[in-house]
Image: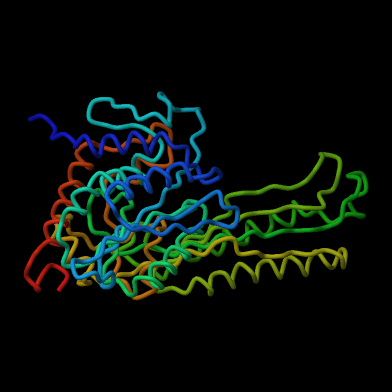
Amino acid sequence: MPTEEVTPATLAWLERLVGFDTVSAHSNLALIDAVRAEADEHGLGYEITHDDSAQKANILISLPASDGTTSAGVVLSGHTDVVPAPPSGWTSDPFLLTRRDDRLYGRGTADMKGFLAVVLGALPMFAAVRRRQALHIALSYDEEVGCFGVPALLDGLLAKHGAQSICIIGEPTSMTVTMGHKAVVMLRITFRGRAAHSSTTNDGVNAVEYAARATAAIRDIADGYRTNGPFDPSCDVPYTTVSVNVVSGGSAANIVAEHCEIVCEIRTIPGQQAGDVIAEVAGVAEAIEQRMRRESAESTVTVDQLALIPALDAPVDSIAAAYSRALGALPGDLKVSFGTEGGFFASTGISTVVCGPGDMAQAHRPDEYIEVSQLVECERFMRALATDLGRDDSGGGMG
């Protein structure tokens, strides 16, 4: 049986979106301008918020209910940035949408420009509906490097439009309703010792060696969580993880290293306080600093928090979960280990779930792709949403 085809509107938007190099280190303004032009074409209102450099922006498109209200609506949320796409391993241009059989290849197709393409392709349909409730489309910047754009976007949404009922985060879950994810913390730990010629190591304090000791101690913390919990069996990795993933330091083979940095990532299961794990890692840093200072009082170890993405932990019977299932999403009660912007929305009182096309297993790698069938399922979901928003009765899917 032939695969059902994605609509030309979605396909055209996906081709455009993939063509924008929105790696987080680069500007996303060209993409935002394209979305703004689409909103203008359909007479839709929007707000744009920039970062401090004015080279990145969020856009919030708001479609009010027929009575003019913009509160108590549905939010469709996604991010515009993508991870880097080094050429090694790619068999086609990562920023040129390429079809092979029933797969569409390109950076961001799965995470998460496939979802954005379906939503933007459905804009004319949403605009034509006489809506009984508001609909907001929220596109952010810098999700991939710490969710730095979404706080300003949320501030604008709540300040201008008030509280909302439901948020659907379109990260790739194979269109399965996903109830939550872990919190994500990134810490940079900086070790400063004292340089010396390597022939007189006793005159120096080796920052690289002490960073290695800290790394081993952090691994011990991680092993403790893996063995002893706490556990959350609804998470695909059911325990808190702690890992050191970046190390940089030293200047030459014959110089005792004066400086070293490590970057540590913490992913705590929902319900566990990320601050408690941060405190454990900070305790390691403090103990290492004390040891270094016994060699030289000028030694320091500092801990800087680079990012904190709150956990999402929605109840299975939440409004957002029930509504997504009613629109045709696959039922599910699992949580994922990758972070999303969902925790930010949920922290404001908006019932939030993660549900979008594609599979994260195909993202963040060479030859990233999304199945055509996944886009078709997402289009079906959006048609159901438009139908529900256009109902005349007061007992619609949101309750």
Task: Say which residue appears at 11% left-offset and 57% top-offset.
Answer: 387
Of the pair 363 and 348, the residue shown nearer to us: 348
Task: State left or right for residue 212 relative to residue 21.
Answer: right
Residue visible at 20% across and 72% down in the picture = 317
Image quadrant holding the N terminus, namely top left
Where, quadrant-wise, is the C terminus in this rendering? bottom left
Judge from the rendering whether residue 369 lies leftward or rightward of residue 33; answer left or right. Answer: left
| Coloring basis for residues | rainbow
Residue at 59 percent of width and 60 percent of height: 306
* Residue 39: percent from left, percent from top: 32, 50
Between 396 and 315, the one nearer to me in the picture: 396
Vertical position of residue 364 compared to residue 311: above or below:
above
Q: Is residue 255 left or right of residue 272?
A: right
Give whichever of 21, 90 is nearer the camera.
21
**On screen, residue 150 above or below 33:** below
Can residue 334 be seen here? no
Percent position of residue 225, x then y: 47, 65
Residue 191: image location, x then y, percent? 75, 58
Q: How many marks?
A: 0
Q: In terms of image quadrants, where is residue 263?
A: bottom right
Where is residue 147? Give x, y as percent. Answer: 48, 58
Q: Is residue 246 visible?
A: yes
Q: Quadrant of residue 287?
A: bottom right
Determine the image quadrant of residue 51: bottom right
Q: 217 and 5: which one is in front?
A: 5
